[in-house]
Image (spheres, helix red, strand yellow):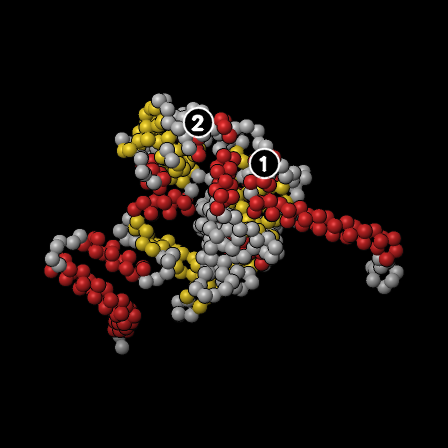
Amino acid sequence: MPKRNVLLLLLITTMSLVAWLARDHGRQARQIGEVLGAIERSYLEPVDADLLEAAAVEGIMAKLDEHSALVAGAARRELEAALDQEFGGVGLELVASAEGIVVHAPLVDGPAWRAGVRAGDVIALIDGVDTHGMSVRDAVGALRGDVGSTVTVGLCRAPSGPGVDGAVPTDDSHMVTLVREIVRTDSVLGDRRRSDGTWEWFVEGEPGIACVRITSCGDRTLAELDTALATIAGAPSLRGLVIDLRSNPGGLLGVAIDVCDRFLDDGVIVSTRRRGAGGGVVVEPRRATPGSTLAGVPIAVLIDGLTASAAEIIAACLQDHARAVIVGSRSFGKGTVQSIIPLSDGRRLLKLTTAEYVRPDETSAQRRGGEPGWGVAPDVGREVDVAGDVRDAHRAWRRRRDMLPETIPNDAASPASAGDLPRSMDRVLARAIDALVSAGADFRGEEEAAGDADEAATAGDAPGPLDGRGG
């Protein structure tokens, strides 16, 4: 047979195989097209074809799991900003109060900061739109926008009022026009903010106890954590480290793996279970690399019901390797991994569940109806459930500690009393500190016992060069 005929036969065979593999998808696509076409031609009222197509895709996604979704518009911008840790905006952290949308804190050296906006200011107008009844999410969306664009904000100033917990507008109201810039958000925070905007990593009133609060797992989280750990490791009297993962919704899988790798020398950090090309199950373990930071320093990890996904990977890994005690309440139980797939229209993303993660102890953290053992549970005796007024008081206290000292409202700016210190205001943190102090004492006891044994061996118990074991 001539060579060109062989090539033609191979081409026909390949095309036939592709057509055979795609036949079901083609049939399904044709049916969806027929339905949309019939609606467009014959439905009683005219219907936007794009809306119908979006509804069809959303209906498909609704048949999957709760974490798979079509992401577009404001939701896409929020997702990208959370993972990238940057967005076009004016640099304001907002909270809702009885007075409306209130500035919790301006980001240091951001557009709003330079314009003199300060904590406690009530945002009354955004580009002429009254914010009364507006949600914080909507206000944030209105303030964000393209870099270089402007937004005009109407402020009601409360120079000596109670601030973020109920600012009182006065006649000192004015308009400020701000130019949006790239605003970068921190995901690794400390115990409290210093006057220069940096973080104090050591817990007030608890000598030698450091604390890093990881609020998400984004693009810059690892670099921020490394900076914090370098400072903490250089402290002369370090007794323990608290890693606070409360309310951390997760983020990037790779970041969670790298965070765990900082504290382990070896072993499986997490495994992912996904569908293989042939339909079988593929399990991919991710292992720690040699070398760890803060070796021998006791660690406590704080979790709650809002600790999810990548944050649960960190807690589970350190728990399974006995590298940390886990304190707080059971985590959310999201044990699946989503891949972000851009669609061809350039406007939408497909967030699709493509894998499940498996803990080092080979169990899943995914919450399933009726099945026990989901999520990450605190160690026995380390359960602390905080609710109601205590939780609200802690959140208000925490907001004040995250503010620059000079921007704290006058009534909250006095030096901390014993009742305002972390041990008194944060029950979960207090339990973790007790665990670290106890673990440190045990560790020192083991070192002392080992030292005594070495001395005894030197005195005559050790094998010498003539007992057949020497060289």
**Image quadrant where one finds the C terminus:** bottom right
Residue 27, x across and y down, in percent: 23, 68
Identify residue for label 2: 161
Residue 387 lies left or right of residue 323; in this view the side is: left
Instruction: Give the vertical position of 460 relative to 181 (above or below).
Output: below
Say which residue appears at 44% left-offset and 39% top-offset: 185
Q: Nearer the viewer, residue 200 or 165?
A: 165
Residue most extreme to the front: 389
Distance CA(mark 2)–CA(mark 1): 22 Å
Say which residue appears at 36% left-offset and 45% top-offset: 78
Say which residue appears at 15% left-offset and 60% top-offset: 39
Q: Is residue 449 visible?
A: yes
Q: Nearer the viewer, residue 259 or 247?
A: 247
Q: Quadrant of residue 369?
A: bottom left
Identify residue for label 1: 419
Residue 36, x across and y down, in percent: 18, 60
Q: Quadrant of residue 381?
A: bottom right
CB atoms of marks 2 and 1 within 8 Å: no
Query: Please, what secondary structure does the residue beneath circle 1 have?
Result: helix
What amino acid type is highlighted by mark number 2? Gly
**Image quadrant where one finds the N terminus:** bottom left
Q: Is residue 182 visible?
A: no
Sequence order check, earlier mark of 2 and 1: 2
